[in-house]
Amino acid sequence: MTGFGKASRTVKKINISVEIRSINSKYLEVSSRLPMAISDKESEIKEIIGQKITRGKVAVLLSVDRNPDKNVTLQIQPGVIRDYYKLLAGIKKATGIKEEIKLEHILKFSEIFKGEETDELAELWLEIKKVFQAAVNDLYKMKLKEGKILEKDILNRVGSIEKKLDYAEKQSQKNVKETKQRMLERVNKLITEAGIQPDNNRLEYELIMISDRLDITEEVLRAKSHITYFKNNVKEKELSGRRLNFLIQEINREINTIASKSNSSGISQHVVEMKEELEKIKEQLQNIE
């Protein structure tokens, strides 16, 4: 599901702000923009998010702003400068470039400087982590609200399918009875015209076979059983989206069988409407975790 979460706090005159955005995705994908000083904490951030969020493309932005009255002291790192100089010299030699290596080339590498921020952010990681957790909780609350709306819509559609199944079952029973009566009348007429002795056992057997081919009671019962299980699992947290998708496939299978057995235009119309509802439910389930 889509969502947005935000949290911030000020620690030692440093303003820490975290924004988390989530859009729909089949799996959990986390991308983050972090200051260099805590770039090694990316795996911990993914773990924090994974505790609450199981699906979606999640973008994380951490902003760290110093209070204007707090001075920042920068120090150069000679070892790093020498390494970058050797790197540039190697590139110059490999490519045959004759241009002289200048200070402006080395200054493009921000890693040659070390400021107080590097140590401070490392020391403040536990506080920064709390801000991340608060932002994730804020995102989770928003996703819960959206989930409630989706749940209501899905259950309404499932209820509509149930009603249509009830209609199809009643209509099918009526059709089976009428079809048997028509077949019996037709056979009796043919027997009378032919002047032969009917085989009542054989006739009864054929009528039973016709009834079985037209009867959709079993399919309706299985579909309703899947629907009941679906309703019971809507509120489950663990893998509920995937489980519900499977149940929708099973309901769809039973409805397809009902369609193949039906010789009623009324049932056929209801089958089309049920399949439309199932498609809408499947679309909604793509957003559910």
Image (tube, rainbow, N blue to C red):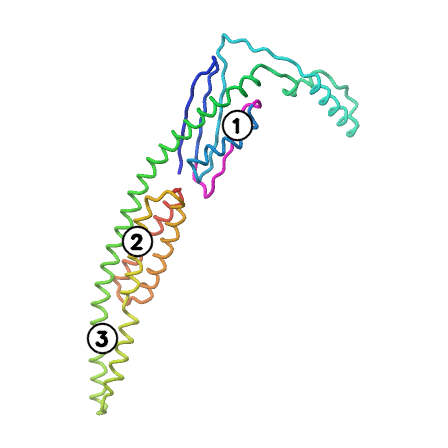
Where residue 235 sits: x, y (%)? 32, 43
Question: Mark 2: which secondary structure?
Answer: helix
Quarter of the image with the N terminus is: top left
Where residue 11 sits: x, y (%)? 46, 16
Which of 75/154 is in front? 75
Q: Label 1 belongs to which residue?
A: 33
**Residue contact at pointers 3 and 2, CB within 8 angstroms:** no
**Residue contact at pointers 3 and 1, CB within 8 angstroms:** no
Question: Mark 1: which secondary structure?
Answer: strand
Residue 285, placed above or below residue 181: above
| Residue positioned 42% across, 21% down in the render | 8
Which of 186/75 is in front? 75
Residue type at tag 2: Ile
Q: Label 3 belongs to which residue?
A: 180
The answer to whether residue 110 is left or right of residue 242 is right
Name the N-terminal-most of marks 1 and 2.
1
| Residue positioned 30% across, 53% down in the render | 227
In reply to whether residue 30 is colored magenta, the answer given is yes
Residue type at tag 1: Arg
Pointer 1 local density, CA inside 10 Å: few below 14, some 14–19, many at least 20: few
Which of 214/68 is in front? 68
Residue type at tag 3: Lys
Q: CA distance from mark 3 to mark 2?
A: 31 Å
Q: CA distance from mark 1 to mark 2?
A: 44 Å
